[in-house]
Amino acid sequence: MKQGIGIFEGYVIAKTYVIQPAVMDWTPQEIVSDRIEKEQQRLQQAVDRVEYSLQQMHNLAAEVQARIFHTHIQLLRDPEWIGEVKLRIKNKQVSAITALFDVTEELVQYFNEMELRLLKERLSDLYDVRNQIYEALMGKEKEQIRLDEPVIIVAEDLTPSMTAGFDLNYVAGMITTGGQTTHTAIIARSLAIPAITGLDIALIPHGKLVILDSYQGLLINDPTAIEIQYYQDKLQQEAVNKKKLEVFIAQKTATADGHNVTLALNIASSDDTRMVQTVGADGIGLFRSEFLFMNRTHAPSEEEQYETFKKVIMQAKAPVIIRTLDVGGDKIIPYLHQRQEQNPFLGLRAIRLCLQPSFLSLFKEQLRAICRASAYGKVKILFPMITTLGEIKEAKALLQEVQAEIAQQSIPFDAQMEIGMMIEVPSIGWIMEECCNEVDFFSIGTNDLVQYMMAADRTNEKVQYLQNCFHPSVLRMIQSVINTAHAHGKKVGVCGEMAGEKAAALLLVGMGIDELSMSATQLLSIRKIVAEYSLKDLEVLSKRVVQLSTAEEISEQLKLFISDV
Ligand code: PEP
Ligand code: MG
């Protein structure tokens, strides 16, 4: 039995399909000066061949993958990489392959020295494209992987060009070594494929029956008959539970005594919007717009953002909360040239970055795109990581400026679009009276609120034990935010991970939360459990637990109250 980290939850009993890393069989080679031009041409032909095949894959792929192929095409056109390879052939008089590997390694070394996790993960893009150019230079045909039964794919990182080559319907599970933000992780989540990371895959044999339990991050090799039976029962139970939840798709979310709660979805791409209908969500509670800026080499234009927002709004047919660019922290966008910081989560993140003079035009472009899209349905704008009143005032002033501009250009937009701010930084949670004068609604980002209240980096495994939303100070802060907002007639939602956890969601309902926003995979089970309790009982529960002194006592009380957690 091996322990890894779950990427997407589920159980799988299937054979492994190990994809070995590509073999790079070449030796450094010098060339005579007469061959320089020929080698440069050979390189260009290989690059053209790869671009053609990437373009084909791009045209056939779903949005998440298409965006990745787009990045790869951009890489091929990058003068600092391929341009440099061409120059290297001439300046060092080496073969195209030698120049390609040398220049790529130098780039990789540069990225590594920058010590940015996200950047490092994007190195897999660089290697993926390099390997394709190498194969084209060697005249190799792309190896096709043919799957004819459900398997668990085992690979260091499944590159997009690999996944485009096989039928994803046969991919029952995935095991990789990359982090949680690799392409494999992105694809696994977007296609709901159970996956784990963090295992030594060299020890996993090919074609052997295994059990993957990504709820617990477990891989069971050579399972016994008893283990297989145990997991078959679990799979059956999972299927029965899923089926039972389907009756909730068409229902409103309400407690047993009829108190309604809005349940919305967190999304990161326009592809995810279809889930609104699939699970019967009340709308999009958080569109993380920064994902439009990731996995690419330059910022999306106003037009591209506008088209994406419009598509989401029209497809959702329900209110959509668009959060403005929230980069920084662990979301580093290389082409935005964010400076390296000692403590990035305490640095120029989200609204702080957007309000920097050098970012204003980019920020205003996004605001324009949101305003223009607001003509097509109910859109609310949400500003992340507000720490001071000054920031929200500045953001609103920019929004007004943009609205005045587009009004002057007779471009349609919703002049009544609601403005909200995230409560993620403790400093703002204690000046709610003043905030109520500034915005129409609030959304509590508990992932960050907990990180900042507990002074525990949310990406640091060593302090995960402090990442506890049941700490009484977190709960009392949330209760105080809800009370003050309600006293001023303003609504409050929670869009952090806390909203999708059963016990936490019940507690939040008892505290008076208006909206819970979560991933599509959680929504129906939250709707179901909310319906099992009366608001009256949940209010009593929440009043009692916020007075307790430790997170442990609170969790204990919740366990006693709720049989299902
Ligand atoms: C949060 O902080 O809870 C949140 C929803 O924002 P993100 O996870 O994108 O920082
Ligand atoms: Mg946040």
Image (cartoon, grey):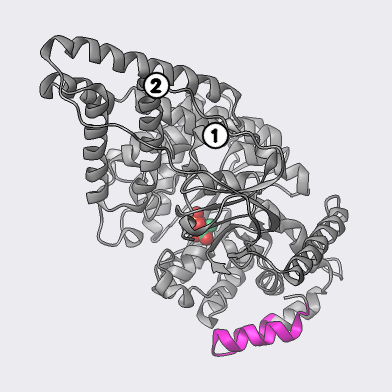
Q: Is residue 536 left or right of residue 298?
A: right
Q: Does the residue labelled 1 lie within 8 Å of ligand 1?
A: no
N-terminal label among 1 and 2: 1
User: In 3D space, how far apart are the residues under numbered discs 1 and 2 (Cα atoms)?
Assistant: 22 Å
Question: Would residue 292 be counted in the magenta stretch?
Answer: no
Tag of residue 65: 1
Magenta residues (range): 542-563
Q: Give how far across and how far down residue 34 sits, in percent.
A: 14, 9
* Camera-nearest residue between 457 and 305: 457
* Camera-nearest residue between 163 and 71: 163
As displayed, is residue 3 above or below residue 209?
below
Q: Give how far across and how far down residue 193 sits, in percent.
A: 65, 49
Q: Quadrant of the N terminus?
A: bottom right
Q: Is residue 203 left or right of residue 60?
A: left
Q: In which quarter of the image is residue 21?
A: top left
Q: What's the amino acid at mark 1?
A: Gln
Nearer mark to the viewer, of 1 and 2: 2
For the point 61% across and 31% down, the residue is 62
Does residue 437 show up?
A: no
Task: Quickly name the residue at label 2.
Answer: 136
